[in-house]
Amino acid sequence: MSSSLSGRTVLVTGATSGIGYETARRLAERGATVLLHGRTPEEAQAAVDRLVATAGVDGARLRPLAADFAHLEEVENLAHAVVREHSRLDVLVNNAATAAPERHTLTVDGNEVAFQVNFLAHYLLTNLLGSAFTTDPGGRVVNVSSALHRTAAIQWSDPNRERRYSRLAAYAQSQLALTVFASDLRVTAVSVHPGVCATGLLPLYGNEGESAAEGAQHVVRLCDPATEIVNGAYYDRSERVAPAAAATEDRTIKRLNKLADLLVGHTA
């Protein structure tokens, strides 16, 4: 039997479907209090109701939260709500992701949508949650990344990819940024590629994938304080492997922080 996570509070972004939903389910089944993030209050509440009805999870351990990550103001409001309502947070699972649209699309904040939803929103959220994070051993951030980060390059002079846009390159760039962010010394964090799963992102990878539940297992394992982690480590499913070289370069980490601070309108 896997160890109990009772007494631990975990925030899972993008928890209304796919790997995020299955991660929330497994964490709640093991006794954690799960803050379940969805794009709208209705989607978050529906996911909570579904977990109570179909997984027999105690509704008292689930808290629906909403923020549309295409609006950074909503991300800020989400962070403030978490800090206000929860004196401590043990784990943050940065899972929410969108496949970039076929056409180049900017958010209201002026950022390419995949870069904002998949990376910038998580960067902002993680930094704003700093005061709620536990200092106990086992406190950590788990970034749900992708093996596609290896194909990516961050376009420093054109992060929005105005000049040459490809949805695959935009998605891969957002995943590389998320993987680089795990090496930031301000946070204890790891990244994980949960495998190619049959979720809304599958078209980016091909036709076949494992179930979202299988992918979620690899995420949940890293949320468990019994799993020792090394800051900045990258896992391909359950194996620790080296990420793309850029992901651990000090210069890249500093440069990304500077770019992200600029784009989210915050200074570190």
Image: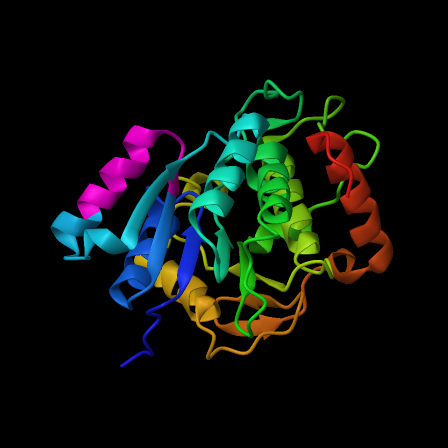
> In the displayed structure, does residue 248 sit left or right of residue 230?
right
Quadrant showing the C terminus: top right
> In the displayed structure, does residue 212 sit left or right of residue 158?
left
Q: Position of residue 66 (x, y in %)?
A: 40, 34
Q: Position of residue 261 (x, y in %)?
A: 75, 38
Q: Main secondary structure of the magenta part?
A: helix
**Can you say whether 35 is above or below 78 in the image?**
below
Asked if residue 36 shows in the view, the reply is yes
Nearest the camera: 164 or 125? 125
Q: Is residue 49 magenta?
A: yes
Q: Position of residue 60 (x, y in %)?
A: 23, 53
> In the displayed structure, does residue 263 sit left or right of residue 146?
right
Residue at x 31% of width, y 37% of height: 44
Q: Quadrant of residue 161?
A: top right
Q: Quadrant of residue 140?
A: bottom right
Quadrant showing the N terminus: bottom left
> In the displayed structure, does residue 251 sit left or right of residue 248?
right
Asked if residue 199 shows in the view, the reply is no
All told, the count of numbered labels is 0
Residue at x 70% of width, y 54% of height: 180
Q: What range of the chain is rendered magenta? A: 37-50
Residue at x 26% of width, y 42% of height: 47
- Name the residue at the top extreme: 108
Residue at x 29% of width, y 68% of height: 30
Q: Position of residue 230 (x, y in %)?
A: 64, 74
State how the image is colored: rainbow
Nearest the camera: 226 or 77? 77
- Name the residue at the right extreme: 251
Nearest the camera: 209 or 17? 17
Q: Is residue 88 magenta?
A: no
